[in-house]
Each structure stands twice: as structure tokens, then as C-alpha cells.
């Protein structure tokens, strides 16, 4: 089963301001019919990178059986972590960067890796704010979530 997940994150006062994510999952069934699910949520105090990661995690965690998944994101932070194999080096070096510093957002990177396990996942980068329809929708969902009144707590924001 081939699934495409479009994602975006937003933070209003990055770092450590209100933020949100937007996720669109698309699947075309064997009859050619498009199925779509959307997710978004906002947080009181977070970072843009955490929201970019949450958008991907929520999309993957919503899948109920193993899939071939293409993640389409405007976040180089997310796409390069996999396409440039940063994540492999971080894991090999006990979650340290090449500069021997702690990798930020380890809680979400580990959650993302767990969410990826049953799937065959690829990452594609698209330029943000460049007219890509689903990316623009995800951006609107993320910023609307960040501006909402019912914001969640991001317990790990500001922590390594």
C-alpha cells in the first residue's frame, strides 16, 4: 500500500513560543479513489523543529498496517536527517552530533524511528511557501493550530 504524508510545523516565537503542526495523509485505492486524513495540534511553548518532527510522527502513527510511505516535508532538518544519514551517525555515536554535542529532540527522533519501523519510508524535501498545494495546506493547518486557544503542553521543549 502506497501512502503519501505531507507535513509542516510552525512556531510563532521560535524558539520556545507557541507552535503547531499540520499533517495530510493521502492514499489512492485500487479503484483510483483518493482518501485523505488530516491532523493538527498546537502547543503552548515549543520549537519549529519539534513541530516538524511531530507532524511526521503523527502521520506515521496514524497508519494501521505496514505501508510504503513517502514523507513530503519542507523541513531540511527532517529530510536531511534521513537522506544525509545524520540519524545513523547520531545513533552510532550515542545521540551525539559530529561536534560531540547532544542531539536535540532525542525524544522525538526516537519516537519517529519507532513509528517508522513497520513501514518502508522515504523522505522528499519540497521548498516551503512555493505554491505546493499540500505543503501550503499543512502550513495553514500548523499556523492555525499554533494560534488556537486550546494549546497543549510540550513537556520536552527546551530539553535535550
Image (cartoon, grey):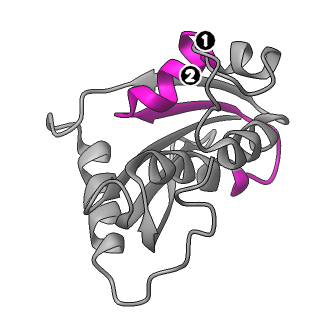
Horizontal side of residue 70 vs 137, given as left or right: right
Q: Does the magenta-highlighted stretch encompass residue 67?
A: yes
Q: Which mark is residue 98?
A: 1
Q: Is residue 29 above or below residue 9?
A: above
Q: Is residue 23 above or below residue 77?
A: below
Mark in front: 2 vs 1: 1
Q: Does the magenta-highlighted stretch encompass residue 41?
A: no
Residue 102 appears in which quarter of the rendering?
top right
Q: Secondary structure under badge 2? A: helix
Q: Is residue 31 above or below residue 95?
A: below
Q: Secondary structure under badge 1? A: loop
Which numbered disc, 2 or 1, marks the residue that appears first in the sequence? 2
Mark 1 Cα shell of 10 Å, populated few (<14), some (14-19), many (≥20): few
* Relative depth, front residue between 107 and 134: 107
Residue 83 appears in which quarter of the rendering?
top right
- Residue 64 locus on image (x, y percent): 79, 54
Span colored in magenta = 61-86
Q: Is residue 50 above or below residue 30?
A: below
Horizontal side of residue 112 vs 132, given as left or right: right
- Residue 61 locus on image (x, y percent): 72, 54
Pointer 2: what residue?
81
Amino acid at each position: 500500500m502506497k501512502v503519501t504524508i505531507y507535513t509542516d510545523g510552525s512556531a510563532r516565537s521560535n524558539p520556545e513560543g507557541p507552535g503547531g503542526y499540520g499533517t495530510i495523509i493521502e492514499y489512492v485505492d485500487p479503484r483510483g479513489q483518493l482518501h485523505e486524513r488530516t491532523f493538527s495540534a498546537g502547543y503552548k511553548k515549543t520549537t519549529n523543529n519539534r513541530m516538524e518532527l511531530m507532524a511526521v510522527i503523527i502521520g506515521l502513527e496514524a497508519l494501521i498496517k505496514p505501508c510504503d510511505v513517502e514523507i513530503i516535508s519542507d523541513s531540511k532538518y527532517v529530510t536531511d536527517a534521513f537522506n544525509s544519514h545524520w540519524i545513523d551517525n547520531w545513533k552510532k555515536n550515542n545521540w551525539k552530533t559530529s561536534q560531540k554535542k547532544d542531539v536535540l529532540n532525542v525524544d522525538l527522533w526516537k519516537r519517529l524511528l519507532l513509528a517508522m519501523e513497520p513501514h518502508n519510508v522515504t523522505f522528499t524535501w519540497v521548498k516551503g511557501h512555493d505554491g505546493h498545494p499540500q505543503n501550503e495546506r499543512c502550513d495553514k493547518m500548523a499556523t492555525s493550530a499554533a494560534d488556537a486557544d486550546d494549546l497543549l503542553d510540550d513537556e520536552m521543549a527546551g530539553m535535550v
